[in-house]
C-alpha cells in the first residue's frame, strides 16, 4: 500500500479544507476504500476521515428526514422513523451487507462504493477500462453473469453495488454537497451516479474534492407503501443479481403514484421511469405490472452470460408491485 497522510475532520468546513489536494480522498467506514487501497487500485496521498463530523437524523420542516453523511448504516436502518415511514430504505440497508460492515459503513461512503466487478479488482492481469482507461474490458467476453443489462457501453458493463442507493432512488432522495471553495449545492440522488459511456473510470458527477454532507428524504404520505427485494445467488454476503425498490400508492385498484428503482442491472441505480409511466393512473393488476416491466426492459441489451436477468427483473418487479398492492392484483 502506498504511504498516505491521515487526518481527521471535526466538521464539514474542516473536511473540505483538509482534502485540498487532488490526491486526497474522504474516508468513511473504509469498508470498500481500504480494500481498494490494499490492492493499489486506489492510491490516495491523503485520507480525510469524516466519521467524526456531526451527523444526525433530523426531521425536516416539510415532514421528511435529513440524514448526516457520517451516520452509520446500522443506525440508519434501525432508526424508528426510517423503519416505520421508509421501510424500503431500512430493508435495502439490511440486505446490503453483514452486521459488522453495516456497523462501520457510513451513508456517504455507501453511496460512493465502487463496483465489485472481479476484473476491476484484479490489478495483476485483467484489462479494465474503469481501473485504467483505454485498457479494454475483460468482462465483455469473460465472466459477466453479474453485469449490466441496461445503460452499459462498449467500454464497461459494470453494475453499481449499493442496495441503499437503489432505495434512495425510489424515494426521490436529495444529496447535499459542499465543495472545496465553500460552495453548497444539492442534486437528486438519481443524478449522483453516471452511466459509463466512454469514461467508466468516473462513477459520479461530483466535483473534485466535493463532499456529501447529508441526504434528504422527502416526506412520504401515509398512503404510500414501500419495500425492497433483492435476488442473489445466496441469502447473505452476496451482491444483487437484480433488486427492486418500489413505492406504491394504490386506492380502489387505481395507481395514484408509483416509483420503481432497479439494482444489479446498471452502472447506477436505475430509475424505471418507463414502467412508472405505464402504471401511473392505471389499474393495479398483475397484467399491468407485467406490461410496465416489459416496457422498462425493452431497452435491455444483455450478453450471453446475463440474459437471464431480463426475466428475473421482470418477475421481481411484478412480485414486488403485487406485494405492495396487497396481492389483490
Ligand atoms: Fe472494468 Fe467495467 Fe469491464 Fe468490469 S465491466 S472489467 S469494471 S471496464
Image: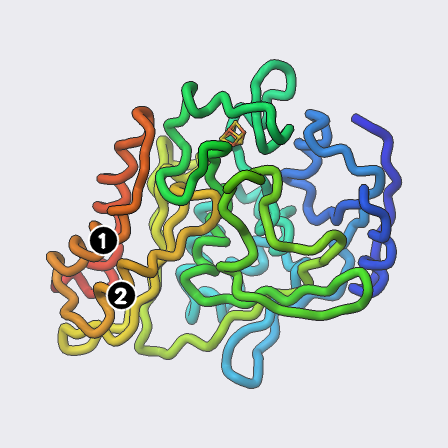
N-terminal of the two: label 1 or label 2?
A: 2
The residue drawn where x is 28% and y is 32% is 307
Q: Secondary structure at mark 1?
A: helix
User: Is 90 left, or right, of 252 in this rendering?
Assistant: right
Quadrant holding the N terminus: top right
Point out residue 278 in the picture as x, y percentages from the top left corner.
22, 63
Residue 200, image quadrant: top right
Q: Which residue is mark 2?
A: 277
Point out residue 12 in the picture as x, y percentages from the top left corner.
78, 64
The residue drawn where x is 53% and y is 50% is 194
Residue 176, image quadrant: bottom right
Point out residue 8 in the picture as x, y percentages from the top left corner.
84, 52
Instruction: Depth check: give the residue in front, 268 or 285.
Output: 268
Q: Tell me if label 1 and label 2 are in contact, CB under 8 Å.
A: yes
Q: Secondary structure at mark 2?
A: helix
The residue drawn where x is 31% and y is 77% is 223
Amino acid at each position: 500500500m502506498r504511504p498516505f497522510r491521515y487526518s481527521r475532520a471535526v466538521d464539514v468546513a474542516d473536511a473540505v479544507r483538509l482534502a485540498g489536494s487532488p490526491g486526497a480522498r474522504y474516508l468513511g467506514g473504509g469498508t470498500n476504500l481500504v480494500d481498494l487501497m490494499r490492492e493499489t487500485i486506489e492510491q490516495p496521498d491523503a485520507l480525510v476521515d469524516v466519521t467524526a463530523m456531526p451527523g444526525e437524523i433530523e426531521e425536516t420542516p416539510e415532514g421528511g428526514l435529513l440524514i448526516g453523511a457520517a451516520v452509520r448504516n446500522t443506525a440508519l436502518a434501525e432508526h424508528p422513523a426510517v423503519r416505520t415511514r421508509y421501510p424500503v430504505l431500512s430493508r435495502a440497508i439490511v440486505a446490503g451487507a453483514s452486521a459488522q460492515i453495516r456497523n462501520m459503513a457510513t451513508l456517504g461512503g455507501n453511496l460512493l462504493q465502487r463496483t465489485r466487478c472481479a476484473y476491476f479488482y484484479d490489478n495483476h492481469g485483467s484489462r479494465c477500462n474503469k481501473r485504467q482507461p483505454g485498457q479494454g474490458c475483460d468482462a465483455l467476453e469473460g465472466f459477466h453473469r453479474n453485469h449490466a443489462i441496461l445503460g452499459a457501453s462498449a467500454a464497461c458493463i459494470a453494475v453499481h453495488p449499493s442496495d441503499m442507493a437503489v432505495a434512495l432512488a425510489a424515494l426521490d432522495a436529495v444529496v447535499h454537497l459542499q465543495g472545496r471553495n465553500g460552495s453548497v449545492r444539492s442534486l437528486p440522488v438519481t443524478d449522483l451516479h453516471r452511466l459509463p459511456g466512454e469514461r467508466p473510470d468516473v462513477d459520479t458527477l461530483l466535483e473534485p474534492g466535493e463532499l456529501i454532507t447529508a441526504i434528504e428524504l422527502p416526506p412520504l404520505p401515509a398512503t404510500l407503501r414501500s419495500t425492497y427485494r433483492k435476488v442473489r445467488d445466496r441469502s447473505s454476503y452476496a451482491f444483487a443479481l437484480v433488486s427492486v425498490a418500489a413505492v406504491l400508492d394504490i386506492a380502489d385498484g387505481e395507481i395514484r403514484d408509483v416509483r420503481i428503482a432497479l439494482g444489479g442491472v446498471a452502472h447506477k441505480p436505475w430509475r424505471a421511469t418507463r414502467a412508472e409511466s405505464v402504471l401511473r393512473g392505471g389499474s393495479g393488476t398483475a397484467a399491468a405490472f407485467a406490461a410496465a416491466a416489459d416496457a422498462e426492459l425493452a431497452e435491455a441489451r444483455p450478453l450471453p452470460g446475463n440474459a437471464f436477468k431480463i426475466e428475473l427483473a421482470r418477475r421481481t418487479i411484478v412480485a414486488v408491485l403485487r406485494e405492495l398492492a396487497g396481492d389483490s392484483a
